Image (tube, grey):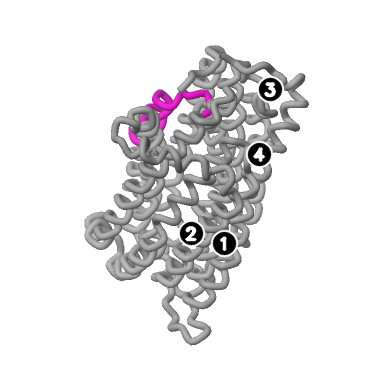
């Protein structure tokens, strides 16, 4: 039963108008979007610093990072189930249910961190099997090996940040990310280039900085929010029972596949670029990095929408107005980035590298990235709306169809026709367009239904 309106949290109360909803959603989204942007800036900093060493170092970091993210991001997707579980519990006034969800996340997250670390042992054989340039593989192996110590910290931070955001608590995660960026920048300078008596490690040195940064931001967010998460410790014994996972995994596994299908598609696209040259691989990394800026801002609006929608569903209110407001916001943001990528492609590429071949390929990719900005933003926000509404299985099928049945085969066909890396990106753009169209139709259906309780 829904709480009386006067007793519900602010995010679980319906807005009086679309204008009021736009204001409310922006107030929730901007700190999340800023946090997402600050979070991705750690990887941007790493890649920019490594990019000014050699293209082999940059390509090695790229192919190693895609191996890491192709494992880490899907497994992390399991924990995104906390969005609807916690937001709906908060909206319904079930504080104990929100704490139990975090306890389950701690147990499952520990297992997922171990799995991720284990997969890093196969970096070398996997990249050789995928046909990556031989000179880049030793760099990639050293890079992923140096990421391993920071994997538990990365999962712990992501878990706690997701749980807090679903409750509407954005500040602890953002403070942690901003401070960790400063630590990461300093350590990149030390380990990549060799300062303060340390040897110059190149690309693998950036992974050391990232590992330290992961643990640092976990310590900060845990310290800032301990009063919120401390009660969840009382549920750890219950959460350790395998039977308690039965509520988390059926929803979490589709989210893992949902995120996996996209990250695997972009990783495979990167490895296809590596079949051409180290320069093609490095240019793909530049375009992906720049696209990740706008995408993470879109993820901020998607996360805000998931929190808002989840709490409204938990409190028994309609979600249509929130869905419209989230889409309007993200379309406005992505139009701006589309213009920037199309107009300033050469200048943006030169920030990452001074290699003419790398810049030349990147300049061909950024206008394609500009063309799919609206699609990318739409799918990020619609996934958030559907996740908050408890609708996670059908959207996963859309990703499989769009990327793996249509997009990647088209990328490969254009690659064989001699289109090079731009052909790979045309296939990805088509996939994003198809997925975003299907997701918009699904949002319309789910909104009409009123969401699904989890």
- Does 389 appear in magenta? yes
Q: Distance between the residues labelled 3 and 2?
A: 37 Å
| Residue closer to the observer: 192 or 367 | 192
- Closer to the N terminus: mark 4 or mark 2? 4
Which of labels 4 and 2 is toward the front? 2
Q: Would you name the residue on which mark 2 appears?
A: 214
* The magenta segment: 388-407
Q: Residue furthest bottom?
A: 197
Q: Would you name the residue on which mark 3 appears?
A: 7
Q: Would you name the residue on which mark 1 appears?
A: 180
Q: Circles 1 and 2: CB distance less than 8 Å?
A: yes
Q: What element carries label 1?
A: helix
Examine the rendering and report whether any part of residue 77 can be seen: no
Q: How far apart are marks 3 and 1 (CA)?
A: 37 Å
Q: What element carries label 4?
A: helix
- Closer to the N terminus: mark 1 or mark 2? 1
Q: Would you name the residue on which mark 4 appears?
A: 29
Place residue 262 in its image quadrant. Answer: top left
Which of labels 3 and 2 is toward the front? 3
Q: How far apart are marks 4 and 3 (CA)?
A: 23 Å
Where residue 208 appears, as percent x and y from the top left, is 43, 69
- Closer to the N terminus: mark 4 or mark 3? 3
Where residue 406 appears, as percent x and y from the top left, is 37, 33
Q: Relative to 366, does residue 245 appear above or below in the rendering? A: above
């Amino acid at each position: 039963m829904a709480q009386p309106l006067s007793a519900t949290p602010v995010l679980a109360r319906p807005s009086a108008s679309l204008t009021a909803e736009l204001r409310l959603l922006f107030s929730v989204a901007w700190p999340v979007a800023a946090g997402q942007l600050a979070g991705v800036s750690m990887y941007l900093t790493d890649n920019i610093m490594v990019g000014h060493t050699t293209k082999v170092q940059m390509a090695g970091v790229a192919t190693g990072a895609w191996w890491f993210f192709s494992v880490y991001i899907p497994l992390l997707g399991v924990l995104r189930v906390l969005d609807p579980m916690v937001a709906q519990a908060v909206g319904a006034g079930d504080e104990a249910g929100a704490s139990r969800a975090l306890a389950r996340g701690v147990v499952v997250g520990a297992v997922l961190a171990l799995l991720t670390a284990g997969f890093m042992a196969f970096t070398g054989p996997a990249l050789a099997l995928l046909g990556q340039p031989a000179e880049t593989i030793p760099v990639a192996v050293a890079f992923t090996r140096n990421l391993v110590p920071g994997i538990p910290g990365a999962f712990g931070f992501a878990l706690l940040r997701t749980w807090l955001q679903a409750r509407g608590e954005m500040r602890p995660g953002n403070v942690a990310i901003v401070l960790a960026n400063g630590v990461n920048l300093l350590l990149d300078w030390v380990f990549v280039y060799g300062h303060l008596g340390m040897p110059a490690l190149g690309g693998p040195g950036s992974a050391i900085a990232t590992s330290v940064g992961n643990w640092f931001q976990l310590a900060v967010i845990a310290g800032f929010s301990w009063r919120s998460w401390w009660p969840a410790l009382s549920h750890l014994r219950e959460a350790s029972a395998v039977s308690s996972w039965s509520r988390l995994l059926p929803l979490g596994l589709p989210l893992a596949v949902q995120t996996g299908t996209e990250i695997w598609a972009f990783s495979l696209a990167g490895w296809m670029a590596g079949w051409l040259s180290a320069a093609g691989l490095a240019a793909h990394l530049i375009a992906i990095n720049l696209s990740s800026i706008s995408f993470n801002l879109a993820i901020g609006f998607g996360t805000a929408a998931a929190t808002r929608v989840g709490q409204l569903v938990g409190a028994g209110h309609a979600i249509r107005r929130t869905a419209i407001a989230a889409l309007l916001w993200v379309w406005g943001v992505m139009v701006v980035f589309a213009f920037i990528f199309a107009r300033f492609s050469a200048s943006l590429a030169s920030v990452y590298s001074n290699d003419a071949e790398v810049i030349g390929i990147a300049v061909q990719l950024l206008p394609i990235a500009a063309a799919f900005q609206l699609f990318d933003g739409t799918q990020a926000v619609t996934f958030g709306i559907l996740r908050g509404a408890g609708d996670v299985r059908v959207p996963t099928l859309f990703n499989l169809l769009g990327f793996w049945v249509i997009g990647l085969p088209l990328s490969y066909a254009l690659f064989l026709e001699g289109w090079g890396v731009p052909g790979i990106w045309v296939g990805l753009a088509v996939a994003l367009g198809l997925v975003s169209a299907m997701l918009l139709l699904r949002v319309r259906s789910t909104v009409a239904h009123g969401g699904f309780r989890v």
